Structure formats: structure tokens, C-alpha cells
Image (spheres, grey):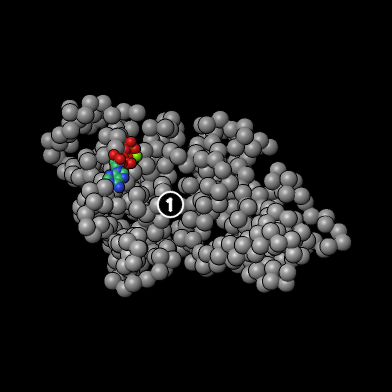
Amino acid sequence: MHLQHLSLSNYRNYTRLELALPLGLTIVQGANAQGKSNLLEAIVYLATSRSPRTSSDAELVNWLAQAEPYPYMRLAADILKNERLERLDITLMPGQNNGRLRKQVRINGVNKRAMDLIGMLLVVLFRPEDVELVAGSPSGRRRYLDIALCQMKPAYCRALSEYNKALAQRNALLRQLAATGRPAADQLRFWDEKLAATGSLVVARRQWLINHIQDEASLRHLDLSGGYERLQLRYLPSFDPGHFPNSRAPAYPSTQQLREKGVAYQSLEIDDVRTSFLAHMQAGRGRDVAAGMTLLGPHRDDIGFYLGQRNLRTYGSRGQQRTAALASKLAEVTIMTTVSGVSPLLLLDDVMSELDANRRAMLVDMLNASPQAMVTTTDWSHFDTPLLHAAHRLQVHQGQITVIVPDSPDAEPLPPEPRHPYSSSLGSTKR
Ligand code: ATP
Ligand code: MG
């Protein structure tokens, strides 16, 4: 897959950008706060119709444009995929009635749902904040699974969206039941079945992905850490999807036990998970009514990262957590390529400065093996000279991008510091 061209209008600090992108490695250099992360965020937004940094689309509209009578933002990408040229565009513009922003998604000029866009442009983004994948909250880990799976399997995305809608309905009903003290009504059965039908696919695919990440990531982790300890990923669901409780003998593991040990199935049949989920929901119905919410299901899933028997979330050093997160992200690239037959665009936001020489070298190998990759940096010296000379180089300053032409005076000397028009006025930008 080749992202050939990117156009941005009124997107964050880019008022207007037309950018051609070659295959291979592109390095984007800029001081702090010039637009490096914004650029990669724009590409992820085009791929997933969501920002990896914010849930508020309004934040993405350029501040100056926000003050205009008709504030709008537009992103577009030309992609060459399986020898077909596809054009994606997303526009945010004021809605007709309430003035709130409306999102319009188009593929090859035809209006589509945001969900149809996902999977057209495959991306894997890695940022320093991704250490939170291991160290942060379960919701971040679920989001990681969801973004990866939605890009690979459109049916997953549909099931997840239906699951979330059904969950909101079931929770509303449970709140009503809790408030009125009425016994659990038959209406619950309807939502139980809806949750089980959609949630079972979510659970089965998550287990599938975790197994694959585990296999790939443990190999990458050995290389990255130069160590001998095996990285393990375990699915930590809120109920055991391969176990069928009955009301007489609730012998299934407690949530606490599952949280500690997790479960590992080579593969899960969706129909089995459905039966199991339904049985667990019905066995736990009293608790759900008392709590006024659904206590079991994929919305409560988690993944555990372990080194030996130690959970990295609690016991890992920051460096160990970062290495595990990086290994998992790199594993995602391989899995996505195998599943879709198309290599995703690899996006690395300012990660070089945080890595030691060994990890940097590993990452550079990965970049070189990737058909198209973009990496941002504050400092050219994070890359060695041959790599810099082989790469397509861009410089960003206040939302304006300049292409560095290889033999131009601007491109020399490299490294340690390039002479570029802004370096003297901005001083050192190393972090
Ligand atoms: P760093 O090296 O610190 O990570 P960066 O180059 O990645 O910097 P970005 O995160 O891309 O910086 O942000 C660039 C600038 O865009 C920042 O100054 C930020 O305040 C600004 N910005 C963010 N949102 C908007 C917006 N909606 N309109 C205009 N500018 C914005
Ligand atoms: Mg940044």
C-alpha cells in the first residue's frame, strides 16, 4: 500500500498542506510544537476516522478557522492499493441545525459511513505515550485491540458498534429496574441475546489477536531486549468464554481469578462463546440488577503483559514496559500484513530519542523492511548518515513543510545538526 498524497485544510496548525509521499522511509524533522505529531495524527484520522489523541473532533479544526463564519476542516488522501488508486476524504463542517460539526466521509467522491473508511488505509502508529499500553488503564488496552481488529476485520467493527449500542440499552434498563425495585423483567432477555450475539464475535477475535501478538511479540521482544525472558500476553476477560456455568454450580473462575491468571484458548468458536456469555449473564443477572449495570462482557476485558510470572503493569520498569509495548506494536505490523495481504503504513512519532542504541537499530531494521514508513524527530542525529541519505526528508516549521532536496546546501552537513533556516532562531530543540 502506498499513501501517495496527503491534503490538509484547516487541520490543527496546518492551514493548507499538499504533500506528495514516496514509498520507503520519510523522516520528518522539526522543533517542538511545529506539527510533527499533528501530521501523523492526520494520517491516522484518515485511516480510522478518529484521532488517537482526542475524542473531540472540534479540537482538530484550526483555531483561526474556528473564528470564521463557516469553519471547516478537510483531510484527503490518495492511496495506491492493489494497483488501484483510491481517494479518501473527511470534512468537518457546521451542521444544519445546531451549528455543531458534522463529519462527512467520502471514498472516491461517494458519501460513506465512517465505518466504511476503516481498512482502506492501514496504519500502525507508535508514540512514546504507547508505554501506557502496558502501564495504563484497561480501556487503553481494549482500544488498542479495537483499532487493530477494526482495520483487519470489518465484521469486528460492526459487531463492536452493535455491542456498544446494545450495552447502553441494557444498562439503561438495568438502571430502571434498580430504581423501581421491580424484578428482572423479560425485556432483559432480549438485550442479553443481543449482547451475546455481538459480544461473542468481539471476544473470539480478541483472543485470536492476542494469541498472534503473543507469538510475534515474544520474538521481537527477545531481539529488542537482548534478554532471555519471554514476553507473554494473556487475555484477561471478565468471564471465562470457554466455560458454561449452570445455575446449580457456578464453578467458573471468579473475576478476580481471571484477572490474575487470564485464559488462553487456541481458538474460540463464536457459537460457544455466545452460549457461554449468555449463561454467565443469566447467572449474574441478580448482581447486574443490583448494580444497575452490566458487570460482565468484553467492555470489561483486559490484556496482561507478563515477563516470566511478573505482571509488567505492576512490576515492570518503565524501560521494560516501553519495550513490551514496542514489541506488541511491531507484531501488529506483521499480523496486519499477513491478514490483509497489504503492508500497513508504519508511523513512528518521536520514539527514537527514548530508545537505546540496540532498540534503535532494531527499529531501523523494521523501518527498512517496511514498504512505507514515516518517522518524526526533533533531531536528525538520531539517525545515521547512510539512512538519512537514503530517506526522503521533510522539515516542518509552524505547519509548513519543506522538502529537503538531497544535494541542496540545506541538506549539509548531516549529522550532527542540519543547517536549516530556523535552527538559529529557535535554538536547541533536543528533549
Ligand atoms: P513535539 O516535538 O513537542 O511533540 P510536535 O511538532 O509534535 O511537537 P504538534 O503536537 O504537532 O507538535 O503540535 C504543533 C502545534 O499545533 C502546537 O503548538 C499546538 O498547540 C498546535 N495546535 C494544536 N491544535 C491546534 C488547532 N486546532 N489549531 C491550531 N494549532 C493547533
Ligand atoms: Mg509531537
In the picture provided, is 370 more to the left or to the right than 153?
A: left
Q: Is residue 90 visible?
A: no
In the image shown, does 100 or 38 lie closer to the viewer? 100
Q: Secondary structure at mark 1?
A: loop
Q: Name the residue furthest right.
A: 248
User: From what the image shows, is residue 331 above or below residue 174?
Assistant: above
Q: Determine the residue positioned at 59% across, 32% down.
A: 316
**The residue carrying mark 1 has its beta carbon less than 8 Å from ligand 1:** no
Circle 1 packing at 10 Å, graded few (<14), some (14-19), many (20+), is few
Where residue 77 appears, x then y in whole percent?
A: 29, 60
Q: Quadrant of the C terminus?
A: top left
Q: Determine the residue positioned at 51% across, 59% down.
A: 149
In the picture provided, is 270 more to the left or to the right than 40?
A: right
Where residue 166 appears, x then y in whole percent?
A: 59, 66
Where residue 96 appears, x then y in whole percent?
A: 31, 67
Identify the residue under disc 1: 55
User: From what the image shows, is residue 56 above or below residue 168?
Assistant: above
Q: Quadrant of the N terminus?
A: bottom left
Q: Determine the residue positioned at 66% across, 62% down.
A: 176
Mark 1 residue type: Ser
Q: Name the residue furthest front.
A: 180
Where residue 335 appears, x then y in whole percent?
A: 50, 55
In the picture provided, is 342 more to the left or to the right than 69?
A: right
What is the count of numbered marks?
A: 1
Q: Quadrant of residue 359?
A: top left
Q: Determine the residue positioned at 12% across, 35% down.
A: 409
Q: Quadrant of residue 388?
A: top left
Ligand 1 falls in quadrant:
top left
Q: Is residue 40 visible?
A: yes
